[in-house]
């Protein structure tokens, strides 16, 4: 299939209509479409509307619209605090659109590109919430297939939202070769691989059929980057990158940064096992391990606080009583969260 060209009409003026929604202003545009802030008069709230205007033949355009709307409705059945809410999907006047929850914050990739580094506990917390969201989606037979930092939106208090189910599939459709247009993909020879290369699972990189465990690998790759500031593999050419993903061992986290807790490193490395059967078999299993890790760390910090001396304690007696405290526990007890500045919501590739 020839890659689709997407063209956009001039920005819609304020008070224009997209379906029943009244446009307020344009939020942004990119290769996959245009996003508007709009108002829903029926339920009296602001929403985001993403529009698509692909240049296609009549038959292919009709197929794209049917498939897009069916899959958007499948994602719309998901109801989870860490998944963006889909309100409506339709096509009229030559424009296919998706109405969704309006978020204010920043995509995770923009936060990482700014040089911000999360603490291990913050990484574990965000990954736990996304793993729980994936468990919810997988239990309803929806596989995302493009987990990456730009598809994780961070709102206030490090509250993550999983966005863009544009190439999501139910398991019985994952082997389809004629994927709809406007999906993110990489061309390797004559093969069209759906998804974003840096975060693809080995089986996805090899063009093999995938299941829910591909999302688990990709979430592990995102957590890896959050902890180290780099993706697991780097290469100038996409084919070389995919070869590394498929065949090269993932560099161990503790080899890159010895300060990363071993327990958290184990969780991330297990999620990124080359063979799917060696990974967590469900996102729920990964979420539970992350939750256990966080609870253990919180208990350790609480224990340190209870053992710390009062203001009256001083001198040799304090040293004798508290000098054996573990350095790592003290460091954890002193850690503080870093605030993330909010910016306009941009739900684009």
Image: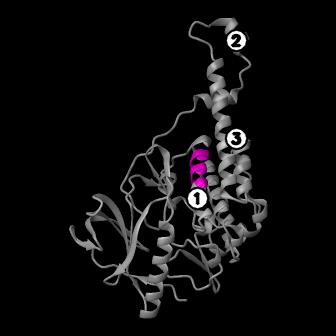
* Cα gap from disc 3 to disc 1, whole angstroms: 28 Å
SS at circle 1: helix
Residue annotated with mark 1: 136
Viewer-nearest of discs 2 and 1: 1
- Please report the residue visible at 64 percent of the width from the left and 87 percent of the height from the top: 190
- Quarter-wise, where is residue 298 in the image? top right
Q: Position of residue 4 (x, y in %)?
A: 47, 84
Residue annotated with mark 3: 261
Q: Position of residue 61 (x, y in %)?
A: 43, 88
SS at circle 2: helix
SS at circle 3: loop
Nearest the eye: 265 or 46: 46
* Cα gap from disc 2 to disc 3, whole angstroms: 27 Å
Q: Position of residue 289 (x, y in %)?
A: 69, 47
Tell me if label 2 and label 1 are in contact, CB under 8 Å.
Answer: no
- Please report the residue visible at 66 percent of the width from the left and 54 percent of the height from the top: 284
How many other residues sit within 10 Å of disc 3, few (<14), some (14-19) or many (≥20)? some
- Magenta: predominant secondary structure element? helix
Earlier in the chain: of badge 2 and badge 1, it is 1
* Bounds of the magenta segment: 123-132
Q: Position of residue 103 (x, y in %)?
A: 39, 56
* Cα gap from disc 2 to disc 1, whole angstroms: 50 Å
How many other residues sit within 10 Å of disc 1, few (<14), some (14-19) or many (≥20)? some
Earlier in the chain: of badge 2 and badge 3, it is 3
Tell me if label 2 and label 3 are in contact, CB under 8 Å.
Answer: no
How many other residues sit within 10 Å of disc 2, few (<14), some (14-19) or many (≥20)? few
Residue annotated with mark 2: 319
Image mark for residue 259? none
């Amino acid at each position: 299939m020839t890659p689709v060209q997407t063209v956009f009409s001039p920005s819609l003026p304020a008070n224009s209509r997209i379906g029943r929604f009244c446009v307020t202003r344009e939020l942004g545009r990119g290769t996959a479409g245009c996003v508007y802030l709009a108002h829903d008069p029926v339920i009296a709230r602001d929403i985001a509307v993403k529009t698509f205007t692909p240049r296609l033949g009549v038959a292919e355009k009709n197929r794209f619209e049917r498939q897009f709307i069916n899959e958007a409705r499948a994602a719309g059945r998901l109801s989870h605090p860490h998944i963006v809410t889909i309100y409506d999907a339709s096509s009229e006047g030559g424009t296919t659109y998706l109405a969704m929850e309006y978020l204010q914050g920043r995509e995770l990739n923009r936060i990482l590109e700014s040089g911000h580094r999360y603490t291990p506990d913050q990484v574990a917390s965000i990954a736990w919430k996304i793993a729980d969201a994936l468990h919810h989606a997988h239990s309803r037979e929806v596989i995302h297939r493009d987990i990456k930092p730009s598809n994780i939106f961070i709102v206030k208090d490090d509250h993550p939202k999983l966005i863009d189910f544009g190439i999501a599939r139910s398991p019985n459709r994952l082997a389809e070769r004629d994927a709809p247009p406007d999906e993110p993909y990489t061309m390797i020879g004559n093969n069209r691989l759906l998804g974003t290369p840096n975060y693809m699972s080995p089986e996805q990189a090899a063009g093999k059929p995938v299941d829910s465990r591909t999302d688990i690998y990709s979430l592990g790759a995102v957590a890896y980057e959050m902890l180290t500031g780099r993706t697991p593999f780097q290469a100038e050419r996409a084919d070389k990158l995919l070869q590394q993903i498929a065949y090269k061992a993932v560099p161990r986290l503790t080899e890159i940064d010895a300060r990363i807790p071993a327990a958290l490193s184990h969780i991330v490395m297990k999620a990124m096992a080359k063979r799917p059967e060696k990974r967590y078999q469900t996102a729920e299993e990964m979420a539970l391990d992350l939750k256990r890790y966080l609870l253990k760390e919180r208990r350790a910090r609480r224990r340190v606080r209870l053992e710390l001396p009062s203001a009256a304690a001083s001198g040799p007696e304090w040293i004798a009583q508290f000098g054996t405290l573990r350095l790592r526990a003290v460091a954890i007890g002193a850690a503080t969260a870093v605030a993330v500045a909010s910016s306009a919501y941009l739900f684009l590739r």
